[in-house]
Image: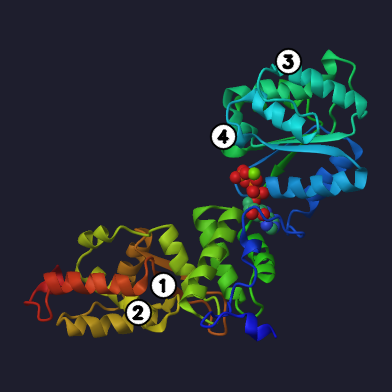
Amino acid sequence: MVCERIPRGSQLPKIILDRSKLDLSYIPARLPHRETELREIAEVLERGTGPLLIYGKTGVGKTAVSRRALKEAAKSAGLRYAYVNCSRFPRTASRVMSDLLKQLGEGLPDRGISLYDQLALLENFVIESNGMIAIVLDEVQDLGDRAEEVVYSLLRLHEISLSPQLTRLIVIYREESVPQFLLEESTLSFFTRKLRFKPYTESQLVDIVRARAEEALRSGSFDGEVLREIARLTSKYAEGNARQAILLLRFAADIAEREGADALEVRHVLLADSIEHPAFDLSILDELDLHDRLLLLAAARVQARRGRGWLTMGELEEEYRLIAESYGVPAYKHTATWRRVKNMGSRGVLEIRRSGKGLRGQTTLISVRAPADELAQTIEAVLDRTVGKWPPRGLHAI
Ligand SMILES: Nc1ncnc2c1ncn2[C@@H]1O[C@H](COP(=O)(O)OP(=O)(O)OP(=O)(O)O)[C@@H](O)[C@H]1O
Ligand SMILES: [Mg+2]
């Protein structure tokens, strides 16, 4: 019986069904918003219409899409292939070549073979297989000053001998650290195709995270609001980066699971994000005046009490007035309060956004950028130390 296999005291996961689907090395069968790129790469590999140059910022799917295309094309077109991630062999040409040859089944001892000999072996292999091999060189930027030698050797292999050209060659680099020679026209002219992977938009990230959550999490344990929050925060810190979005989903799901929650909520996402990107150094409290501190405390208290991510300006003001009263200081009116909130937003102390359009129109939503209860306790301690419960008159002006 199934029940007997569950160790006593252990709990069934409520949220994460298959954590391996959240691994960065996992390549899902469906890659939303990369259908065109996948088709283009598949065509290059199947019909031999390359060489192809792929580039784009980090986390935009260059590796995942190319590997998926390679796997599928190798099967459908019966290709032998090698996928080499050059970042594993930084700045070494011969280790990249030996990995490549090993994967093609032409492995030789690492030591004692010059790059020249390795290229000769590859040439033979290309001739024998009549060019029906695919080579993907990923992360060539990590080869540093050796990148040019490796890439040129492969692009021009057929010029030295009579081997067919490597038309199923794909070179991938990360845009943030592009090697200079890959920008030069003399190099670019070797590539019959160039494909830039654009950063994902926020709504594309929602779809990507949704697809991943559907594979990894229990159905009903997350909702659209959670997914939108992940995409929004990702776009803020790492624009268009699916890797960051998936990491945030995983981190938030782990937090929710550990807490024993029934579902993944926005507050788990915010907590995961605030740990990932410590929003502000608590020492910033020293730079805030009394009323900013009271406002921040108000936001933190409401959030800690409710366990939900965002509060409205109205909710914040109500709590702020109560707290101000408890410290015996008159509260500011709406306009001055709003100015302070906005100012703390631009200093990164508070998070401010507009709500989606609802029946009552848009409203301003506010959230603290740190675990709410910890923050509330810290501010209370600071206030008790500096103000006390019964502050002297005139503190209003601090
Ligand atoms: N369209 C997508 N659908 C689902 N998952 C995706 C998609 N694009 C990227 N991912 C996932 O996001 C992560 C990062 O993608 P990938 O490694 O392909 O990025 P990259 O462009 O190669 O980045 P880098 O330049 O840092 O190597 C991977 O875990 C990948 O599976
Ligand atoms: Mg990559």
Q: Which badge, 3 or 2, is on the more N-terminal residue?
A: 3
Depth order, front residue of 84/390: 84
Closer to us: mark 3 or mark 1?
3
Q: Is residue 124 visible?
A: yes
Q: Which badge, 1 or 4, is on the more N-terminal residue?
A: 4
Q: CA distance from mark 3 to mark 2?
A: 70 Å
Left or right side of 388 for 126: right
State the count of labels: 4
Depth order, front residue of 272/290: 272
Identify the residue under disc 2: 316
Identify the residue under disc 1: 366
Q: CA distance from mark 1 to mark 4?
A: 37 Å
Q: Which badge, 1 or 2, is on the more N-terminal residue?
A: 2
Residue at 89% from the left image edge and 41% from the top image edge? 46
Identify the residue under disc 3: 116
Is label 4 in a helix, a strand or a loop? helix
Q: CA distance from mark 3 to mark 1?
A: 62 Å
Q: Is residue 336 visible?
A: no
Relative to residue 237, is residue 304 depicted above or below? below
The answer to whether marks 1 and 2 mark residues whose Cβ atoms lie closer than 8 Å is: yes
- Residue type highlighted by circle 4: Ser
The answer to whether marks 1 and 4 mark residues whose Cβ atoms lie closer than 8 Å is: no
Q: Which badge, 4 or 3, is on the more N-terminal residue?
A: 3
Report x, y in % for residue 354: 49, 71
Left or right side of 10 for 396: left
How is this picture coloured?
Answer: rainbow
Q: CA distance from mark 4 to mark 3?
A: 28 Å
Q: CA distance from mark 1 to mark 2?
A: 8 Å
Is label 3 in a helix, a strand or a loop? helix
Closer to us: mark 4 or mark 2?
4
Identify the residue under disc 4: 177
